[in-house]
Image (spheres, grey):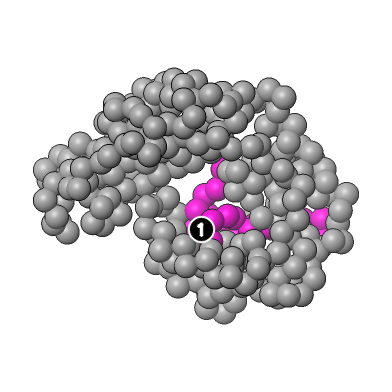
Amino acid sequence: MENLGYYNGKIGLLEDMQVPMLDRACYFGDGVYDATCAHNHVIYSLEEHIDRFFNSAKLLDINIPHTKAELSEILKDLVKKVDSGDQFVYWQVTRGTAIRNHQFGQSNFKGNIWVMLTPAAPANTYVKVKLATEKDTRFYHCNIKTLNLIPSVMASEKARLAGVDETVLYREGGRVTECAHSNISILKDGVFRTAPLDCLILPGIARKHLIKMCGQLNIPVDETPFYLDDLMNADEVIVSSSSNFCLQATEIDGKPVGGKAPTLLAALQKALVDDYEAYCGK
């Protein structure tokens, strides 16, 4: 198949798939999702993504109608049905199907599983990106990978119109949280600094891998808040996500940033690429 859509066991091309109008995703965005990439028909870091997916669902009291092992096997099987071995692998669960009602009560909804697989080239970790900043107006559940992404959608579109690649979000006092669809970290004086895991950021898998590689390379890690001034004066600014492991930012709001620790950054990038290739095969 060129691409693949899946809905509660039904499989077809994405353009042919249909979902019930009463799925609560249609009215409330009532669900959570996760995503990663596949190479050689192998889903990268699937176990970690499955763990995060189940945690997001638990935090919203959403019932996933499969065990972790069952869902993993479903995804592994579906990936093999797509012609290209290089894919963007996306899946979500919505609370269920019912007449529109804000309250979901104790009705024991059975969650609906959606999967979308599309061909996608392997990420180029060595691409350099430009960023813009914007006040973070999202709610206080950013640690949950919810379907409610309108603020991120608008921030991403604003970035496109401004001719940059991503938007860095910040809260009151200039505290940097994350980007519209990525985590952001910095290198300063040989230390890797990244925002703490609280309700203001998503616990990124790529962020987790960066911290792991810092341990292997003996790079100290500081998981405390940092601010816009720290960002602009960092030795390197790093954008990371499940499809972009460790991107170097060279410009923020039209001003040059980073470029002061190329050897340390290159070591991190190589470690992440090596890990990806070891997991999925070259």
Residue 193 lies in the magenta stretch: yes
Magenta stretch in the rendered image:
180-205
In the rendered structure, the answer to whether residue 30 lies left or right of residue 136 reads left
Which quarter of the rendered picture does the C terminus lie within? top right
Q: Is residue 256 above or below residue 84?
A: below
Residue 1: percent from the left, percent from the top?
Answer: 46, 25
In the rendered structure, the answer to whether residue 159 lies left or right of residue 254 reads left
Badge 1: few (under 14), some or many (20 or more) residues near its Cα, within 10 Å?
A: many
Residue 11: percent from the left, percent from the top?
Answer: 34, 27
257 or 150, which is in the foreground? 150
Residue 82 lies in the magenta stretch: no
Residue 198: percent from the left, percent from the top?
Answer: 49, 58
Residue furthest bottom in the image: 173
Residue that mark 1 sits on: 201
20 or 74, which is in the foreground? 20
Q: Is residue 232 above or below residue 62?
A: below
Label 1's element? loop
